[in-house]
Amino acid sequence: MAERTPRLAVLASGRGSNLQAMLDAIADGRLDARVAGVFGDRAKAHALQRARDAGIEAGALRPRDYAGRDEFDAALFARVAAVQPDLVVCAGYMRLLGAAALAPWAGRIINIHPSLLPDFKGLDTHARALAAGVAEHGASVHYVTADLDGGPVIAQARVPVHDGDDAEALAARVLDTEHPLLVGSLQLLCAGRITLRDDAVELDGRPLGAPLQLAANRLLS
């Protein structure tokens, strides 16, 4: 990817704060990439408007217009493929992706998830973390596979769980780390330094023994 400016396609269903973090990082020179298109399943998602405001192709497909998940995924990824991305970034995309749609993108599609995977896959992660009584929570960037939130983990950000936290307070603390976590991961991916080989994440050609961690200086190490 390092030979030219990498092209990113983003899948989003919600407000698009992680998309905005990517756009800001590109604008100020911290991320050498171009967002070529933003796509989703909800026409009113604010992420799509953020993209249009930035002059980026954006659009949503309605799941109910398709016979099933496979047909919807095929149509969605046809839109994705048309913008010729090097990498697909799921940033708050809330639908499961099927194995058939993912197969052509193996090793080229990532997701950011609000938990320290493999803990708390799926939804309602903050409330579930509080109910479990964990001392630490956070976010993970991982490769996407057909296994829900089960692909190889690239990097994580950890936050303490405080006495008196509710799900909203914990979610805000985690979200504050998601933006530098995603941007830092993309910096390495777009530079070709992070790759996936035989289901193992490699950094500079060597397998990672554990996911990279977001340090206090907001950089990955």
Image (tube, rainbow, N blue to C red):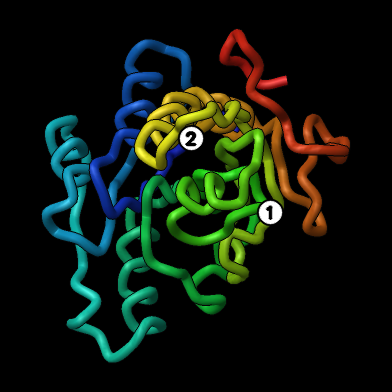
Residue furthest to the front: 164
Q: Quadrant of residue 123?
A: bottom left
Q: Residue at x 56, y 31 (%)?
A: 161
Going by the numbered disc 1, the residue's amino acid type is: Pro
Going by the numbered disc 2, the residue's amino acid type is: Pro
Q: Residue at x 38, y 66 (%)?
A: 95
Position of residue 181 relative to residue 96, above or below, is above
SS category of the residue bearing label 1: loop
Q: Nearer the viewer, residue 100 or 161?
A: 161
Residue 213: percent from left, percent from top = 69, 27
Q: Residue at x 66, y 21 (%)?
A: 220
SS category of the residue bearing label 2: loop
- What is the total number of numbered labels drawn onto the structure image? 2
Q: Quadrant of residue 166?
A: top left
Location of mark 1 (residue) = 118
Location of mark 2 (residue) = 6
Mark 2 closeness class: few <14, some 14–19, many ≥20 residues within 10 Å: many
Residue 31: percent from left, percent from top = 47, 21
Q: Quadrant of residue 216?
A: top right
Residue 59: percent from left, percent from top = 18, 56
